Image: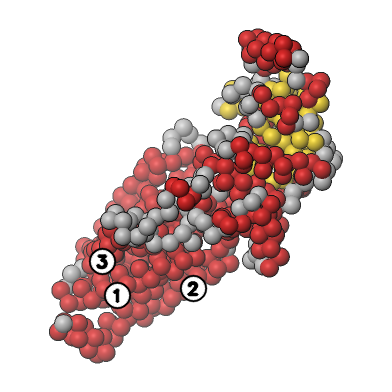
Amino acid sequence: MASLSEFFSALGRYDFLQSALITAIMVGMMSGIIGSFIILRGMSLMGDAISHAVLPGVAVAYMFGFNILIGASLFGILAALLIGFVAAHSKIKTDTSIGVVFSAFYALGFILISMAESSTNLHHILFGNILAVNDSDIMTTAVVLGIVILFVTFFYKELLVTSFDETYAKTYGLKVQLLHYALMLVLTLVTVSALQTVGIILVVAMLITPAATAFLWTDKLSTMLILAATFGVVSSITGLYFSYTFNWASGPAIVIVAALLFAISFIFSPKQAVFHFHNKPTKQEVD
Amino acid sequence: MLTIKNLTVAYDDTPVFTDVAVNFNAGKITGIIGPNGAGKSTMIKAILGLIKSQTGVVKYNDQSIKSVQKQIAYVEQRKDLDLSFPINVFDLVLTGTYGKLGLFKSPGKAERAASQAALAKVSLTEFSKRQIGNLSGGQLQRVFVARAIVQEAEIIILDEPFVGIDLQSETAIMKILKQWRDAGKTIIVVHHDLNKVSRYFDDLVVMNHGIIDFGPVADVYNAHNIEQAFSADLSSVLFTAKEGAQ
């Protein structure tokens, strides 16, 4: 394919493309890893909510010129706390509470951004603009990736046990709530990083789709994390290629690739076995 | 001895029970029986600190229950678990070591050996690599009992452990409970099948929105208490049938 070799030669020539590639790889990894925990905890909606709720933080950071990680973390955690508070102090169920809080934050974000910046920037925030990442963006993304890897390494068994059996974790005295909010904090950091590559609207896809794809292929959590990160990276690189070659917005390009990987896995993976290429253990074997 | 004094639990200002006082003895298997909604699960959840109680003191050998939290193992009802979770039988049992390991420590050789031994005790060694969704209800319940073994707890609380499981698993679990008892542990079982009460338990707590009676099975399992907790009909069926058989 001519365009493929063209992409690689461009990669050698243009710094911006190298930066984009490095960022895409890092974001693919971190969103796959954190996304795995999000889907296993049944928190896909929460992931979506937090990723949207950081918008006012991004706007405020633009307005006052400080690091968007700080602004976004602040609003992300605030949203998570508020969602928990509303659900705990009323008869409203958590999913409803999520809907109310995140849409309010999102709306506030739009208003703040329209006050602060031109519409071009808004477009980039919404759909991602990976070809415009600069060195400081790369540094920030690398720091977030480091935090994600450290967090998951040090708290692996706690994350496993609270995702699987929270009641049991509580009975032996684990601070389950604290871990939940720590995960939410890391999630907001990942969201901000993913914002550059896929945009705020599609962050949730990067969190959920590669993780869901990985889930179809394995019965082991550690393998799932590695696979999810791999699928995230493959989607990011391939998406970046399409984005550069066909001049598509990077976010949709990456997300479509991730969705394709999911579709292929859905058909061929052993857990799904839509066409029964693989033999599932039969009931007789189980008993 | 596990002592509970003036325990009150209410959901939305409707008390499930008020001022409950009851003791659980070490070296005994204590059954808790009562009709649906009697507050059996609520009481054990309050003991475990999973739900807030309005009033009450729970002590184990005169220490506050909080300070001996890692000495309690809980085998919960399985219905709320995600059986598609990517975890196999061995790794699930291994989570039983997490409490005593504490933060930042990974399970090592000793923990893995203990988990392997516990799986052997419930005769599930050959299933250790199997994903938990591919087990029968009885096998899964034995896996959770194996996790409780690994916890090396002094108090073991089981909520309806025999519901929906095969007889083989029930017998295997009962064997473990008796081993625990003989090791001097405190075993508490929430139970609904009245037929097996005298066979399974040493002590009994009869509940219906509070404690009707508690003590050795021989003293407590009688027509009067069953009538109080359940109904006169059930009581007469159970106890006249028994007398007739003698």
Secondary structure under the numbered disc 2 in the rendered image: helix
- Kind of residue at badge 1: Ile
Q: Is residue A121 left or right of residue B135?
A: left
Question: Foreground residue, B42 or B231?
Answer: B231
- Pick the residue in front: A86 or B220: B220
Indicate the position of residue A38 as horizontal and vertical percent values.
44, 55
Res B162 seen here: yes
Vertical position of residue B213 compared to residue B200: above or below: above
Neighbour tally class for label 3: few under 14, some 14-19, many 20 plus, Cα within 10 Å: many
**Rounded to the nearest whole Å, what is the CA distance between mark 1 and mark 2?**
20 Å
Q: Which residue is mark 1?
A: A237
Q: Which mark is residue A257?
A: 3
| SS type, badge 3 | helix
The quarter of the rendered structure image containing the N terminus of chain A is bottom left
x%, y% of residue B39? 63, 26
Counting residues from the start of the chain, the first of labels 1 and 2 encountered is: 2
Q: CA distance from mark 1 to mark 3?
A: 9 Å
Q: Which residue is mark 2?
A: A146
Label 1: how many Cα within 10 Å (few below 14, some 14–19, many 20+): many
Q: Residue at x 84, y 41 (%)?
A: B61
Question: Do marks 1 and 2 both belong to one polypeptide chain?
Answer: yes
Mark 2 belongs to chain? A
